[in-house]
Image (tube, helix red, strand yellow):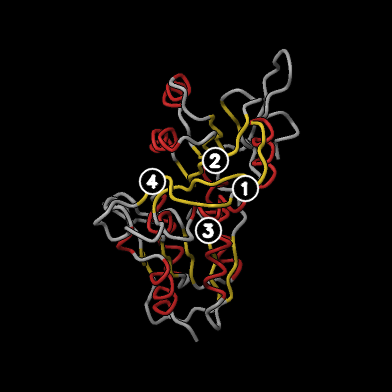
Amino acid sequence: MPTVADVVAELERRYPPAWAEEWDRVGLVLGEPFAPVRRVLCVVDVVPETVDEALAAGADMIIAHHPLLLRGVSSVAPTTYKGRIIHQLIKADVALYVAHTNADVAVPGVSDALADRLGLVDLRPLQPSRPGTPAAGEGRGAGRIGRLPEPMTLAELARHAAGVLPATAVGVRAAGDPNRTVRTLAVCGGAGDSFLADATAAGVDAYLTADLRHHPAGEHLATDGPALLDATHWATERPWLDDLAAVLRAAPGVETLVSDLDTDPWTVHAASAAAGEPAADDKESRP
């Protein structure tokens, strides 16, 4: 019977903790290393709903992308949000492991899975890992740049992205000329506005990521940067869970489940009426 330590060893072979950013908190969060693991649930977020899903499925371990304890806490009392989750997991003997920025830069990693959903080919890093760092080399780095098999307009690409990414209430929105031809596309799973300058420097036609903010996006477009596509954080990272599950299913004796619970906090999208032609986020592009 595989143990928590066995699963951790397989994960850290694929996503070494040394590849994580210094500010990140990855690795085993809780769980006895020698406890048996029969069933694993892969999630983007450790929230009450995914914890309930793990308990209902009889999972012995949760593997999450986002850290539950990214910032220091002074208490894990069950009267606190995070403390309540930790108490639930410990009482149910469910281990918790996190692979975050070390999975972002891996090859294949989070952005590779996103690029695959969009059909991109000829992938390379958007921001290669810095020379001299543990993650340097072999094509590792943040985000990916690739080529669409066939050119699309920005409006067509927005509809395509909304159709191939996991459904959310918000869907996918785009910024730029709807008729702009897109041949090359940069992507980054999760919040990627820190790589806007990298997308511009790469000369791509468009950049798809999550959590784009008003002022940085507006300034980027005003200085002739690539067109932008903004999806939800969860939707851009959920595709990686399938790759993660495939890694674990190769380990004998481990049943691996993937959570499809949408943990994006935005649950309602009401489009305002506008004159003229419908934008790329019309009802055809919404889930």
**Residue wearing tag 3:** 43
Badge 4 element? strand
Q: Earlier in the sequence, mark 1 or mark 3?
A: 3
For the residue marked with disc 3, what is the amino acid? Val
Q: CA distance from mark 3 to mark 4?
A: 26 Å
Badge 3 element? strand
**Number of the front mark, 3 or 4:** 4
- The furthest residue to the bottom: 1
The spot of residue 100 in percent (x, y) is: 41, 56
Q: Residue at x 50, y 36 (%)?
A: 204
Q: CA distance from mark 3 to mark 2?
A: 27 Å
Q: CA distance from mark 4 to mark 1?
A: 19 Å
For the residue marked with disc 1, what is the amino acid? Leu
In the rendered view, would you say 64 is above or below 119? below
**Residue wearing tag 4:** 127
Q: Which mark is residue 236?
A: none
